[in-house]
Amino acid sequence: MTYLLSTYWLWMLLALVLGGIVGFTSFLRSASGWWPQSWPGWFKLLCVLFVIGLVVAVLQWLPGLTGHYLETALLFVGSYIVGCFLGSWLASLRATRPLDADNKVAATSTGGTAPQPSPIPVSTPAPSSAPAPAPTLAAVATPASTPTPVSPKPVPPAPASAASPPVSAAVAPGPVSGEHEHPGKRPPAAARASIVPDDLKRISDIGHVNEEKLNELGIWTFSQIAAWTHENAEWVGSYMAFPGRIEREDWIGQAGQLAKGLETEFSRRVERGEVPTSSDNSTSSSAAISSAPTASPPLASVSQAATEATTGTSQMAASPIGDDGHPGKRPPSVARPSVAPDNLKRISGIGHVNEEKLNELGIWTFRQVAAWTHENAEWVGSYMAFPGRIEREDWIGQAGKLAQGIETEFSRRVDHGDVPTSS
């Protein structure tokens, strides 16, 4: 063993450094330290194999040259494991405080500050001659009947000869809250006044909501998206709370064709008005929700809310939000329950932004999502500007397990702090 240490000490040092780098960069997503719950599965398996090999070497079950190779491998693997421990421990020392659950993921102003959650207004019934006054009700605010559109008016795409020129990397409109919490690299941004924006809704999977978020990041043209790298797509996917979706839907490839003046199958459907979520004459559901309400009619009585919170039954809320223009059927909704609602971010595909939209629709618990029909999923997918995504990511199946107290792989990652968009 002394001979091996004196011969391979440099290689052991390199294995130690490599393990430290891996442990520092990939083991931790929370302040849980180097506790085993934060170890990746492959590392646990490596430790088990190391212990087995160590037992075989100590008992000298593999004599001769084979035993020599085993001991050499154990030295390298042991150094690598120690490095992983040290790197994980160092990462735990610099772990920052988790994000406040009340903060939004996406900044909605050019200054980049996350909007504060709107207080829940309390409406008091007018005086009456009845012997007992009616109870007050904390009602969830519903959007105004005539919201003010937020997204800029799209401009018809230019022909191939006059395609939008590549936009140089300009100063971003402003810092984004939690910008450095996302993997990858934020893409270059451009000032709105310097360019003519394209209709980004002609890219499959970009509706009014996603177009507004991209505009807030300084993304206005097909040329900008076509120039994204893999790191840019990774950052935007994490920021918009749907990691991997940009790559699956091939936003970059579609944008490249549209920037050259070429049409895609989806852009033709948009031009024919066959995609409601990309229609120019329809108002973004996100804009309608974020607009300041002028009236807040009650959704249900206090006794109904208490009953629904206890039994899990769903009653239709008053004043439906934008039912027109969406295929399928709107799911039953309830007033905010008196008990704490479920953390819907434990469902894969639901981040801070989507959870808030579901809450505004009166969706608060896993049991409600698990009870959706195919028509309900179709309506919500169209309303939230990503048709088909709920079915692809199996929100209903995940919610059914979580409603029964059964954990999923994604919910465990959320509980361990491994998902920044659900932190």
Image (cartoon, rainbow, N blue to C red):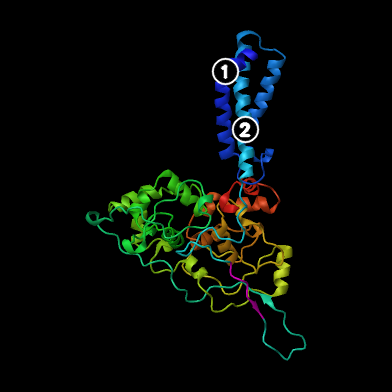
State the residue position of label 1: 8
Stretch of the chain drawn in magenta: 117-123
**Residue located 55% across and 63% down the image:** 357
Residue 360 x/y as whole percent: 58, 67
Residue count near mark 2 (Cα–Cα under 10 Å), binned few <14, some 14–19, many ≥20? some
**Residue located 56% across and 39% down the image:** 25
Amino acid type, callout 2: Phe
Residue 341 x/y as whole percent: 67, 61
SS assignment at label 1 = helix
Residue 287 x/y as whole percent: 47, 68
**Residue located 34% across and 54% down the image:** 222
Q: Mark 2 touching mark 1, by CB under 8 A?
A: no
**Numbered circle sitting on residue 43:** 2
User: Per the image, is 14 magenta?
Assistant: no
In this rendering, the answer to whether 305 lies above or below 354 is below
Rendered image quadrant of residue 14: top right
Nearest the eye: 253 or 27: 27
**Which SS type dominates the magenta stretch?**
loop
Which badge, 2 or 1, is on the more N-terminal residue? Answer: 1
SS assignment at label 2 = helix
118 left or right of 160? right
Q: Quarter holding the N terminus?
A: top right
Nearest the eye: 309 or 20: 20
Residue 371 x/y as whole percent: 63, 58
119 left or right of 288? right
In this rendering, the answer to whether 44 lies above or below 151 is above
**Residue located 60% across and 19% down the image:** 73
